[in-house]
Image (cartoon, rainbow, N blue to C red):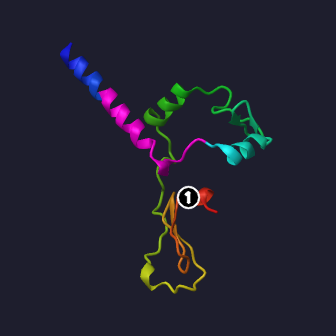
Amino acid sequence: MRIMIITGALILLLAAAIFTYLRQPQFGKMPSGERLARIERSPHYKNGRFHNLVEKPTLSEGYSTSREVYNTFFTEHPSRSPIDSLPSVRTDLSKLPADSNVAVWFGHSFSFHPGRWEKNTGGPFLQR
């Protein structure tokens, strides 16, 4: 019983710490004032949330989450790993000319553009 109380207390303490940490200004805040008014004027904002132009279900008809989890972890698929190595070019980024028209993609969420003042993190869908 004592172990359960200690474990529960640690979980609550961890949850409180995470909640407090995520309330810092760099994580944003709830919209208010003009920003909230602009959001509420959006034709896609109804009943307190944004809606897609075309409703898409999370899973297609005839599929279930449990079945997809089972298939992912316990079913063999022939195309699960590449047949051959992926092509790549080793590049010394410090030697790229600043005025070159080049974008170097490092994967899901990082790219480098010489001559621009920022390195883009967050993926192409979050860029200006």
- Residue 94: percent from the left, percent from the top? 43, 82
In the image, farthest residue toward the right: 43
The type of residue carrying mark 1 is Gly
Q: Main secondary structure of the magenta part?
A: helix
The number of callouts visible is: 1
Question: Is residue 6 depicted above or below 87 in this figure?
Answer: above
Segment colored magenta: 11-30
Q: Residue at x 49, y 31 (%)?
A: 69
Residue closer to the observer: 50 or 21: 21
> Does residue 118 appear to the left or right of 61 in the view shown?
left
- Residue 5: percent from the left, percent from the top? 24, 18
> Does residue 17 appear to the left or right of 36 in the view shown?
left
Element at label 1? loop
The image quarter containing residue 15 is top left
Q: Quadrant of the N terminus?
A: top left
Q: Quadrant of the C terminus?
A: bottom right
Q: Residues within 10 Å of mark 1 (few under 14, many from 20)?
A: few
Residue closer to the observer: 65 or 26: 26
Q: Residue at x 48, y 55 (%)?
A: 82
Residue closer to the observer: 80 or 52: 52
Q: Is residue 20 magenta?
A: yes
> Does residue 8 appear to the left or right of 58 in the view shown?
left
Q: Residue at x 48, y 47 (%)?
A: 80
Q: Residue at x 62, y 27 (%)?
A: 63
In the image, farthest residue toward the top: 1
Q: Is residue 105 magenta?
A: no
Residue annotated with mark 1: 123
- Residue 34: percent from the left, percent from the top? 71, 47
The image quarter containing residue 30 is top right
